[in-house]
Amino acid sequence: MPIRSRLVFCLAALPLAGCSTLGYYAHLAGGETALLAARRPIARVVADPATSPTLKTRLELAARARAFASDTLRLPRNRSYTSYADLHRDYAVWNVFAAAEFSLDAHRHCFPIAGCVAYRGYYDKARAERYAAELRTRGLETYVGGVSAFSTLGFFADPILNTMLRWDDDELAGTIFHELAHQRVYLKGDTEFNESFASFVQREGLRQWRATRGLAPADEVAAAHDEAFEALVLAARGRLAALYAEPLPAEEMRTRKAQEFARLRADYAQLRDTQWHGDKSYDGWFAGDLNNAKLLPFGLYRRWTAAFAALYAQNGGDWERFFVAVERLKQATPAERGAQLETLQAPP
């Protein structure tokens, strides 16, 4: 999951307030306007003789998954993911993460509707890289990551994007379920809650989607590799957090920090070449520099997925009852919500 990051990039805040520059808001408005202008109804694209057979097949699958999302998973029935837009680029947006040299706390950005998030998104990679360079002049470490799909939380009718079609059928359908889940329940300012909830809906929704179509359960090898990779990175992040809490001189801190990142590389290489039998899916992530900012996206998607799975089971596998229970969690105080999630997360 970290490689195919789908962090919610909320553009629903567009009468924009509270961010750093009007120029950034103008960029968001222009980027979203261009994306919306590129939309074409899926039915029209499929009926167009100029549409390639491959694209037609993928969009027909997306349309069936979209119907399943509302009919079976009880996700919002609206115009989101009923159209298609070709952006003629590799990613929909690029997110900029930043953190201090000896900290794993994200440099946060706040929006009126989405609340505070640990990144800032751009429709243009060059703009994202310029902003990252600006943050580095302030002494922050940065990471720029491409995102293939995002949600505007139902504020706009989000389309299927060409950037989503690079995935296999399961990932495409699962992404539709994931993003629509954000439209069903969204807790302002709590990324772990939102992403864990949507990831559970994606996983359980995909299981039911495959069963309905008479398909065997999904191959769990790739998912297991994702989880093992994320666990590896989170372990390194835990060690770094402990290191940064020590009262050490800056030079010694830098030396030990470098050692931890070297250990992360070595641990990954061993995992790849032994248990994974040479699977190099994550080599690209390690090809660039490693720093605190690059570790920030990890842990957001699966922190509470087991808790939401338990809540779903408690409600008899009934989606409507489950969503009501999630809404109750959302209304609790942060302390109460955390305690309830911890209880749900605990093994029986």
Image (tube, rainbow, N blue to C red):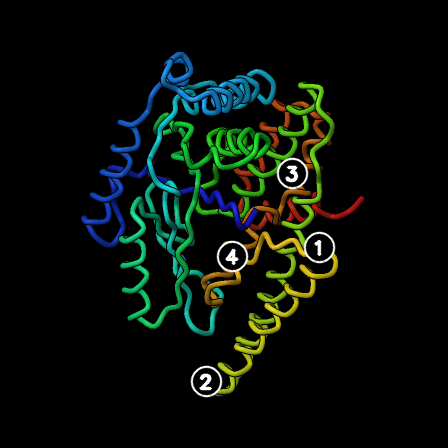
> Alpha-carbon neighbours of circle 3 within 10 Å: few (<14), some, or many (≥20)?
many
Q: Residue at x 46, y 67 (%)?
A: 289
Residue placed under numbered mark 4 in the picture = 284
Q: Residue at x 37, y 40 (%)?
A: 92
Inter-mark Cα distance, 4 to 3:
32 Å
Residue 319 x, y percent position in the rendering? 63, 24
Inter-mark Cα distance, 4 to 2:
30 Å
Q: Find residue 215 and report its image quarter.
A: top right
What element does badge 3 sit on?
helix
| Nearer to us in this view, 266 or 56 | 56
Q: Residue at x 56, y 70 (%)?
A: 241
Inter-mark Cα distance, 1 to 4:
16 Å
Q: Are marks 2 and 1 in contact (CB under 8 Å)?
A: no
Residue placed under numbered mark 3 in the picture = 308
Inter-mark Cα distance, 3 to 2:
42 Å
> Alpha-carbon neighbours of circle 2 within 10 Å: few (<14), some, or many (≥20)?
few
Q: Which mark is residue 276?
A: 1
Judge depth for marks 4 and 2 and give the one in front. Answer: 4
Q: How many marks?
A: 4
